[in-house]
Structure formats: structure tokens, C-alpha cells
Image (cartoon, rainbow, N blue to C red):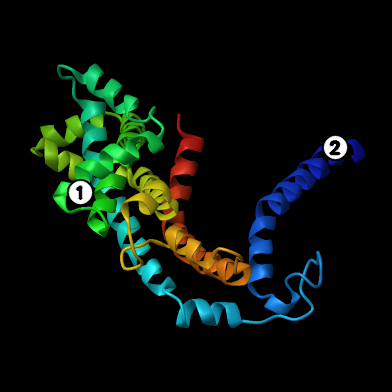
């Protein structure tokens, strides 16, 4: 019995160590956000400050432009996630179900877009968007984020469509449904876990993106929160308490979003576990 308990104990200890390792940065983020400025450097390394304060959160919410950054990020990330998911659902279904000329080259070109370093594309994209009036605007960011996320999201959705038997559509068509009706009424409900995964991936990618938000946006009115965090860094100092408080607040939407789609993600995991 002792021998059989050892693997179980070792496995749980390994999981506990991994959880601590993964959550420690978040804990430290919270710890610094509630530490008064007078104690940030004077107390040295401590697991928890001797005094706590909410002054950093009050400053971020009341005396900074963070609410504007927060709103802009919600608009950009939410819009990008919805648009990309719709486009990826349609294109992923087409790649999964239809055979057409140049299909191989379309897939190859989509893969090719993922191979270029993003920093190489900043200047060309800026030159394209400037005459269109899309620089320094949330619309321009949504367009750019959509363009870069659609290829991967398409392949992600295609893998979910490939796992659904074609017999279901054929049976619906025999019963009088059109191809689009079969897609809408039969296939899409079965791919809700895939749609949730795609929404989560795209939302997270757009929410944390910095490079294009920094290069294409000039000024606080259209800045997103990753760019807004840089406002807490001055020439000679860094307001760590305020920056960490802003970081904690920025985690809330992503956490709530994944909490809402968790049911569908769990459905997808359990369905894959018992498939076959």
C-alpha cells in the first residue's frame, strides 16, 4: 500500500509545485499593488507587506487615463474576437467540407502569413493605413488584429469541423435542409466548444497585443491598456504600485471572459476524451 501511495503523493506534489510556480507572479503582482510607496523599497523582500493600501487602485481609477485604455481594449478585443470567429467559422467550414481549385495554395498562403516577424510588417501596414485614415483609431487596430488572427483561427475551426461526421449534414439535406441550414442548425451547435476556444484565443491575443497598438496609436484617446501601462514609466522612475494595480484590473475582463466560456471548453475536453 505504501508503494502504491508514493506515485500518487509525488504526482500531487508535482501538481502543487506547478500551480505555485504558475500563480506566484500573479501573487507578487497583487502584493506590490497593495504595498504603500514608502514600503516598496524599505522592507526588502517580504511575502506580504506590513501595511496595505488601496491608494494605487484609487489613483489608477480616478486620476489616470486607465478607464479610457480599459474601454478601448474592450472594444478592440471584443470586436476582433467576434469578427475573427465569424470569418474563421465560415472559412474553416469551407476548407473542411469543400474541394475546390487552388485550395492547397490558399492554405499555403495562409500559413505563410504566420511565418513573418510582426516587426517587419509594421512599416508597410502603417503606410497602407495612413491614406485610409485608419491610424490612431480603434478601427485600424481591429482591422490589423483581424487580419493577423484569421489564419490561425481558421485552422483551429477547421480541426473542429473535421471531427464532425459528414453524415449529419447529408441526413439533414435529405430531410429538405439547404447546405447553409445544415451548417447553421446542425454543425454550428456541435462546434460551440471550438467557437469558445477560438473566441478565447483571439480575445486574449488582441487584449495583450502591444507592438501594433504602440506603433499605430498616437495619444491616449485611442490607446489600449498595454500601451497605457507605459504611462506609469517616466524618464527617471517607475510607479510600480500603480502599474501593478492597473495590471490586476486588466486581468479581470480576461478572467470573466474565460469564466463565461468555461462550460463550452469543458464540454469540448470531455467530448474529446470519450470520442470513439
Q: Position of residue 267 (x, y in %)?
A: 44, 47
Tell me if I can see residue 82 in this picture: no
Q: Residue furthest front?
A: 236
* Mark 2 residue element: helix
| Structural distance between the alpha carbons of marks 1 and 2 | 66 Å
Q: Which mark is residue 210?
A: none
Q: Residues within 10 Å of mark 1 (few under 14, many from 20)?
A: few
Q: Residue furthest right?
A: 2
Left-right relation of 134 to 239? left
Left-right relation of 181 to 272? left
Q: Position of residue 110 (x, y in %)?
A: 29, 28
User: Where does label 1 land, which residue?
Assistant: 130
Classify residue 194 by image quadrant.
top left
User: Which residue: 23% across, 56% down?
Assistant: 139
* Mark 1 residue element: helix
Left-right relation of 226 to 109? right
Q: Which mark is residue 4?
A: 2
For the residues labelled 1 and 2, say whether their Cβ atoms are less than 8 Å apart: no
Q: Earlier in the sequence, mark 1 or mark 2?
A: 2
Q: Position of residue 47 (x, y in %)?
A: 79, 66
Tell me if I can see residue 11 in this picture: yes
Amino acid at each position: 500500500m505504501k508503494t502504491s501511495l508514493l506515485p500518487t503523493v509525488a504526482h500531487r506534489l508535482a501538481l502543487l509545485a506547478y500551480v505555485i510556480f504558475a500563480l506566484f507572479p500573479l501573487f507578487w503582482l497583487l502584493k506590490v499593488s497593495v504595498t504603500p510607496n514608502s514600503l516598496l523599497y524599505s522592507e526588502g523582500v517580504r511575502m506580504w507587506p506590513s501595511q496595505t493600501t488601496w491608494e494605487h487602485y484609487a489613483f489608477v481609477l480616478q486620476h489616470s487615463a486607465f478607464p479610457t485604455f480599459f474601454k478601448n481594449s474592450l472594444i478592440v478585443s471584443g470586436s476582433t474576437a467576434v469578427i475573427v470567429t465569424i470569418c474563421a467559422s465560415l472559412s474553416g467550414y469551407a476548407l473542411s467540407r469543400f474541394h475546390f481549385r487552388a485550395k492547397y495554395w490558399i492554405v499555403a498562403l495562409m500559413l505563410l502569413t504566420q511565418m513573418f516577424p510582426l516587426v517587419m510588417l509594421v512599416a508597410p501596414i502603417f503606410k497602407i493605413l495612413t491614406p485610409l485614415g485608419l491610424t490612431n483609431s480603434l478601427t485600424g487596430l481591429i482591422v490589423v488584429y483581424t487580419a493577423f488572427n484569421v489564419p490561425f483561427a481558421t485552422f483551429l475551426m477547421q480541426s473542429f469541423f473535421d471531427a464532425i461526421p459528414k453524415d449529419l449534414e447529408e441526413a439533414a439535406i435529405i430531410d429538405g435542409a439547404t447546405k447553409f441550414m445544415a451548417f447553421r442548425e446542425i454543425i454550428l451547435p456541435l462546434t460551440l466548444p471550438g467557437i469558445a476556444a477560438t473566441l478565447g484565443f483571439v480575445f486574449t491575443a488582441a487584449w495583450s497585443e502591444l507592438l501594433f497598438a504602440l506603433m499605430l496609436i498616437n495619444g491616449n484617446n485611442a490607446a489600449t491598456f498595454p500601451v497605457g501601462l507605459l504611462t506609469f514609466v517616466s524618464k527617471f522612475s517607475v510607479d510600480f504600485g500603480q502599474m501593478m494595480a492597473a495590471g490586476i484590473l486588466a486581468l479581470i475582463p480576461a478572467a470573466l471572459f474565460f469564466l463565461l466560456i468555461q462550460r463550452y471548453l469543458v464540454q469540448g475536453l470531455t467530448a474529446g476524451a470519450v470520442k470513439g
